[in-house]
Amino acid sequence: MPTNYILKKPAMDPNRIQKISKKLLEECTEDRNLALEAYRYFREMVDENPRDTAAKSQMVDCLKLAQSSKNNIVKLVDLLIKLETTKSQGSESSESSIFSQLDGISS
């Protein structure tokens, strides 16, 4: 008969949230860079042939993807701020905050 697995640490402890956030930020940044690289490629195609409507359409799609990636970063930061304010309202302890843990992520 199988036994139930009991977590040794909370499922969403600050370290796990920091790790997930860092990975998401890195992926969003990479997606944005790839989208902007593709935009530049299609831009060169349009510069060579201004009547290329397919390349123009792809340029717009690349810009949408780059903006969407940036919006996802903003949403993630917004959620972390909400989580931190909820956490600080619930307990006024001197634990290290998520803000201080996220300092190293952006660099």
Image: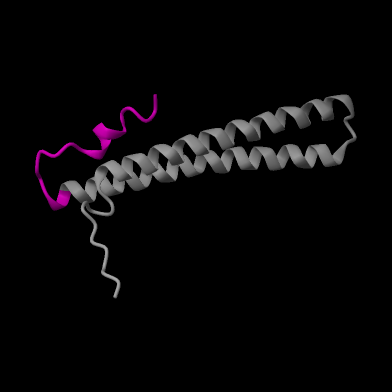
Q: Position of residue 33 (x, y in %)?
A: 59, 30
* In the foreground, 52 or 6: 6
| 70 in magenta | no
Q: Position of residue 40 (x, y in %)?
A: 72, 27
Magenta segment range? 89-107
Q: Residue at x 43, y 39 (%)?
A: 23
Q: Position of residue 101 (x, y in %)?
A: 27, 34
Q: Residue at x 26, y 68 (%)?
A: 4
Name the side, left or right, on which 5 lies relative to 65: left
| 104 in magenta | yes
* In the foreground, 51 or 25: 25
Q: Indicate the colouring scheme.
A: one colour
Which residue of the protein is positioned furthest toward the front in this rendering? 1
Q: Residue at x 75, y 28 (%)?
A: 41
Above/below status of 72 relative to 46: below
Q: Residue at x 39, y 28 (%)?
A: 106
**Number of numbered discs present?**
0
Per the picture, the main secondary structure of the magenta-coloured stretch is loop
Name the side, left or right, on which 47 lies relative to 88: right
Query: Which of the 4 quarters of the picture holds residue 76?
Result: top left
